[in-house]
Image (tube, helix red, strand yellow):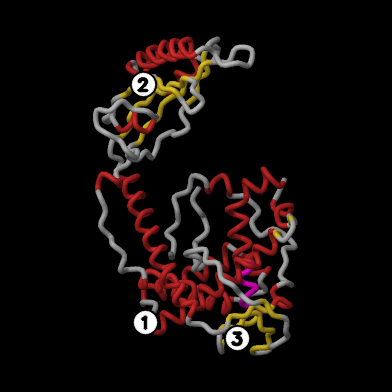
Amino acid sequence: MKHHMTRIAAVILTVVLAIPALAGCMQVNGDRVALVMDNEQYGRAEALLYFHYEQYDTEYNMYSLADALYNGLMNYWQYSNGDYSSIGMLRENAMQNMIQTKMLCKKAAQDGVELSSDEETLLTRTVNRFLREYTTVVTAAEANKETITAFVRENMLANKEYMHITDSIDKTYDEETMMRKRADGLTVMPKLVDGEARPQEEQKEIIEGALKEIELLLEKGETPESIKALFDDDEDAEFGVNVVGEGPIQKPENYEEGKDPDSFEALVWGLKTGEHGTLCTLNASDNYSGYAARCLDDNDEKLKEEAIQTEMTSRRRAKFQEIYDELRASYKKIHVYTEVVDGFNVSETLYDGKDYKDALSEDEITTLE
């Protein structure tokens, strides 16, 4: 699922920091201090905005799961078990994100990284959109246009600094490693008899017979879904549309050209666009299972580009972790004031789920990360 909310927080990496928690009632500009980083003090209002932005983001990404496991988001926020609580984790994540953003902004100033004129224009548009579309966050955080603008600006700058400090990664890659094939197909499993597996030879005979019929149907242009429907009442085997769906499928480890396939992925990797094939093999339980596959695209450019981007993101994160560890070590003091932050709570959900189904099929909005 693609995130429908423009991502502006510099949550590039989940970085676990040891943050001393202090009690106290210091103030900065008339506001209670929530965070101290060396000689800089940051107030409750700013921390509260991070808290409720993180709340909305979590609710969007947890919406379906929270409904299934907790019977709703409010039940999820009320969950606690031992030392863990959903609210406690929300507070911790929000403060981690705030600390990371502040560190990256200070590093950006040292490196001479600033927002360009085009990015300033984007900043204005993003702020206006935030105020228009995420009113629940603005209201819960007791924020105004000035505080939202400062929040968006710092997070845009932090993301730009992230790209700057990780730009030295190796950007080369092996073409075949990044290649992705797109395929679909079916699985075939022998049905149990009185709760017991059939003898291996009988299993093999059932699967091989079914795969021959499937091959003929694929040759005629039938889809895996239509084929499954034809066999729904089969007495000897169970048929399923393969969970791989339409990919992506990458080259299996230890794959050798000409070697008999031992998995659905290996079967697909030996096919060209438009070809189909079958496989009968013993599974980990020493029972036979069958696979039928048809290759829809033996070199899907979109999936390949996604694989490349995933790899580059992984390399950037690894590089960032190294740099961030050093950056974190350069700070002598990072204090979160628990008397302030522990007062942050969820009294109502900020994401109502009304556009959730539509968001499942939306094109992803260009992000700022």
The magenta stretch spans residue 154:
no
The residue under the point 36% across, 50% down is: 306
- Amino acid tagged 2: Thr
Ranked by sequence position, the earlier of labels 3 and 1 is: 3
- Amino acid tagged 3: Gln
Across and down, in percent, residue 253 comes to 34, 40
The residue under the point 43% across, 70% down is: 159
Mark 3 or 2: the one toward you: 2
Which secondary structure type mostly characterizes the magenta part of the structure?
Answer: helix
Is the Cβ of the residue at disc 3 closer than 8 Å to that at disc 1?
no
Ranked by sequence position, the earlier of labels 2 and 1 is: 1
72 over 347 or under it: above or below: above
Across and down, in percent, residue 129 comes to 52, 66
Residue interval drawn in magenta: 44-51
Horizontally, is 273 left or right of 247 in the view? left
Q: Which residue is mark 2?
A: 278
Q: Which residue is mark 1?
A: 111
Res. 347 image quadrant:
bottom right
- Amino acid tagged 1: Asp
Q: Secondary structure at mark 3?
A: strand
Bin the neighbour count of mark 3 within 10 Å (Cα to Cα): few under 14, some 14-19, many 20 and up.
Answer: some
263 over 15 or under it: above or below: above
Residue 41 is tagged as: 3
Quadrant of the frame with the C terminus: bottom left
